[in-house]
Image (spheres, rainbow, N blue to C red):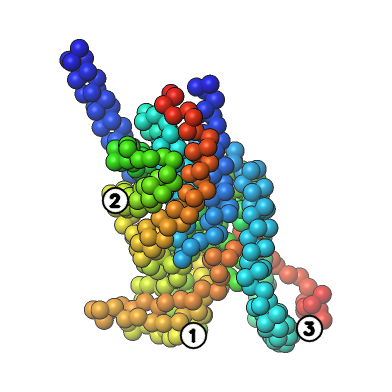
């Protein structure tokens, strides 16, 4: 009787050890699987999608209500500031239209036909965020059936926010730029065109940094950082943020730039997935600002 | 009956995952998120048999892992270990007195984050163990304690009569 019990204990322990080893291997194997979804994961996410969509709408209402109560005092101030900003942007916009006319006329003079790079964007709503803070991901309500594929860049009105890391038929997961490993992209400074790798900072608090910069590189605080178009992202000139601090490494060979991102990664509601960037060849010769506006 | 209970548990965990992803992920306390699955599993483990508590912890961990889609198996191990520690060191608690279970839920949250840090380190993702993670250990545990104020009484009311039933 005692022997039977000891055997049973031994067998249970063996099963537990084998299971532990198997799960450890599984963790290691799925650890690097950052792009794409296994069929089981895809099925599970697809199954939860309708309920997630409904719950997100309901939680939007609840969160907005509480946020409205807390932020009530600031709303008027924000409204006044936005009115001033709109007026400024209108004047900048008319200035840009003039530049565009000038630019197109100069292109015509130089016989350059490719005048515009047209972006095809799929708009989507954020319906979920990562349930673990250490993963910087959000889920959107558009997926494979809407033309979304892995590695496509995702933007909002402020600038680049990340890239698509996995897709199901009706949802997609975005790995945010702030992810300190998988969010990495190549960026350049607009002012000097100096390249570097833009990645989330080590604190995990949602900051960005540009690394791999030699100490002699010509970059300064206030420079704007945009995507370079190099690497697997492949899209140029998408805004990322502004350099707010430059930190030299201890050995003095390299430095890194701390970036203030344009996008607020904690407040994402609607985003756009750039699914295509194609070069449009224009036949119409624009000569005045009215022509361009048309 | 034996078939229905796991199905209900499956639905509860799925709903908890959705609520966590859509609602609680936006309500952070000092930058830390809650872990409803952990609170549910620990709260339930006080009222069900040890074997069933392990099975439920495994199912909940697996669903959470599939939902996250990375390091599959990590939550399975950590949740089962946490339940094991709770069952081992809290076998004589008075379940009717809410203070003790809440204290155990707080300690088990702390244990969960420490064990998860170990798994993250073993998996070679030590870059995830940053200041934010440390912040999560402290404030996340407090957040879970607040959630337990609601979830534990619900577990008590719905499960204490079934204690010992397999």
Relative to A179, does residue A143 appear above or below in the rendering? Answer: above
Q: Nearer the viewer, residue A270 or B138?
A: B138
Dot 1 falls on which chain?
Answer: A
Evaluate whether residue A82 shows in this view.
no
| Residue carrying label 3 | A289
Q: Give the tally of numbered discs.
A: 3
> Which residue is painted at 64% across and 64% down in the image?
A66
Work out which quarter of the rendered image holds the C terminus of chain B and state it.
top left
Dot 2 falls on which chain?
Answer: B
Tell me, yes or no, whether dots 2 and 1 are on the same chain. no
Q: Nearer the viewer, residue B121 or A180?
A: B121
Q: Secondary structure at mark 3?
A: helix
| Residue carrying label 1 | A222
The CA span between labels 3 and 1 is 32 Å
Relative to A260, does residue A278 appear above or below in the rendering? Answer: above
- Which of discs 2 and 1 lies nearer the camera? The answer is 2
> Which residue is painted at 45% across and 85% down in the image?
A221
The image position of residue B128, as x and y in percent, is 36, 58
Dot 3 falls on which chain?
Answer: A
Tell me, yes or no, whether dots 3 and 2 are on the same chain. no
Relative to A239, does residue A276 appear above or below in the rendering? Answer: above
Q: Is residue A61 left or right of residue B34?
A: right
Q: Nearer the viewer, residue B108 or A46?
A: B108
The image position of residue B138, as x and y in percent, is 37, 60
Evaluate whether residue B53 shows in this view.
yes
| Residue carrying label 2 | B118
Q: Secondary structure at mark 1?
A: loop
**Image marks 3 and 2: residues in contact by CB distance under 8 Å:** no
Q: Is residue A46 left or right of residue A75?
A: left
The image position of residue A182, as x and y in percent, is 43, 58
The CA span between labels 3 and 2 is 63 Å
Q: Earlier in the sequence, mark 3 or mark 1?
A: 1
């Amino acid at each position: 009787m005692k022997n039977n019990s000891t055997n049973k204990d031994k067998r249970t322990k063996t099963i537990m050890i084998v299971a532990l080893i198997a799960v450890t291997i599984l963790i290691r194997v799925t650890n690097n699987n950052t792009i794409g979804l296994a069929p089981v994961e895809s099925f599970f996410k697809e199954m939860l999608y309708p309920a997630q969509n409904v719950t997100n709408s309901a939680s939007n209402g609840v969160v907005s209500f509480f946020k409205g109560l807390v932020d009530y005092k600031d709303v008027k101030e924000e409204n006044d500031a936005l009115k001033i900003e709109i007026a400024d942007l209108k004047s900048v916009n008319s200035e840009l239209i003039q530049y565009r006319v000038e630019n197109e006329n100069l292109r015509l003079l130089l016989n350059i036909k490719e005048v515009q790079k047209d972006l095809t964007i799929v708009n989507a709503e954020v319906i979920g965020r990562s349930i673990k803070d250490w993963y910087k991901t959000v889920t959107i309500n558009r997926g494979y059936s809407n033309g979304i594929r892995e590695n496509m860049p995702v933007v909002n009105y402020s600038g680049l926010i990340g890239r698509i890391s996995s897709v199901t038929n009706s949802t997609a997961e975005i790995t945010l730029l702030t992810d300190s490993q998988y969010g990495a992209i190549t960026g350049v400074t607009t002012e000097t065109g100096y390249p570097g790798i833009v990645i989330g900072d080590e604190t995990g608090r949602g900051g960005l940094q540009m690394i791999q910069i030699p100490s002699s590189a010509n970059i300064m605080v206030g420079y704007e950082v945009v995507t370079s178009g190099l690497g697997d992202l492949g899209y140029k000139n998408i805004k990322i943020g502004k350099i707010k601090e430059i930190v030299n490494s201890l050995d003095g060979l390299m430095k890194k730039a701390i970036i203030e991102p344009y996008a607020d990664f904690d407040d994402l509601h609607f985003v756009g997935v750039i699914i295509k960037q194609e070069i449009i060849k224009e036949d119409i010769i624009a000569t005045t600002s009215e022509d361009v506006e048309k | 009956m034996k078939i229905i209970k796991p199905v209900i548990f499956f639905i509860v965990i799925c709903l908890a995952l959705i609520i966590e992803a859509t609602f609680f992920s936006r309500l952070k306390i000092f930058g830390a998120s809650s872990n409803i699955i952990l609170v549910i599993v620990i709260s339930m483990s006080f009222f069900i048999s040890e074997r069933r508590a392990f099975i439920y912890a495994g199912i909940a961990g697996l669903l959470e892992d599939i939902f996250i889609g990375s390091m599959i198996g990590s939550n399975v191990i950590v949740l089962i270990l946490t339940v094991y520690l709770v069952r081992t060191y809290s076998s004589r608690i008075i379940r009717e007195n809410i203070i003790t279970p809440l204290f155990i839920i707080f300690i088990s949250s702390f244990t969960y984050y420490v064990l998860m840090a170990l798994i993250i380190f073993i998996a070679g993702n030590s870059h995830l163990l940053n200041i934010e993670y440390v912040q999560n250990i402290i404030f996340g545990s407090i957040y879970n304690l607040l959630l337990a104020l609601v979830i534990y009484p619900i577990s008590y009311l719905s499960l204490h009569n079934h204690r010992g039933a397999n």
